Each structure stands twice: as structure tokens, then as C-alpha cells.
Amino acid sequence: MRPVGETWHVVAIGVEGLPDQWVLQIYDTGECDPNYTFKSPVNATEADTGLDDLPAAIAHLLATERSQH
């Protein structure tokens, strides 16, 4: 076990115009907890909703996250 810092902050990251978010913990040392939470109101059956105008890599990432949660 190694110390990662005494304090941490919750940071939400998203794509502008979409409701999806990745929620991470960032420690005061600048390190990021390797676990994260993905939140989206989009149903897994509609994983590709609203992704038409995004670059292919970002659209694929979001569709994958949505279908797994």
C-alpha cells in the first residue's frame, strides 16, 4: 500500500451537450483513483442516442459505457 494523499476531490467529466458523466476521485497529490463511476440517464438499449455528430472514438467510448451500465 502506498499513500495517495490526505485529501481528495470529486470531479465530474462529461462531453458538452450530453448528460453522461464520469465521476472520479482526484487526490491532493494529483493522482487519480483508478476506479470511477459512469452516470447516464440514457438506457443501455439506446446507447448510440445523440452521438451522431461526435468523433468516432468518443462516440464509441460513450456507447460502450452506456451499454455496460
Image (spheres, grey):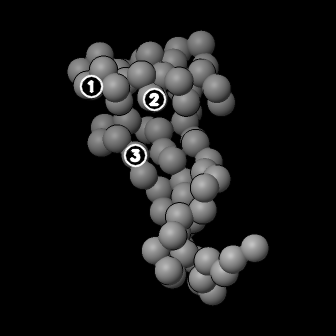
**Residue 36, above or below 4:** above
Q: Residue at x 60, y 55 (%)?
A: 34
Left or right: residue 63 compared with residue 69: left
Q: Please tell me the numbered disc located at residue 14.
A: 3
Q: Amino acid at mark 1?
A: Leu
Give the Cα separation between the discs numbered 3 and 1: 13 Å
Which residue carries the number 1 mark? 54
Which structural element holds mark 1?
Answer: loop
**Residue 67, above or below 28:** above
State the image quarter where residue 27 is shown: bottom right
- Are dots 3 and 1 in contact, CB under 8 Å? no
The spot of residue 25 in percent (x, y) is: 57, 65
Q: Residue at x 55, y 36 (%)?
A: 40
The spot of residue 33 in percent (x, y) is: 60, 62
Which residue carries the number 2 mark? 62
Which structural element holds mark 2?
Answer: helix
State the image quarter where residue 18 is shown: top left
Q: Please tell me the numbered disc located at residue 5.
A: none
Other residues around mark 1 within 10 Å, as few (<14) / some (14–19) / many (≥20) = few
**Residue 69, above or below 56:** below
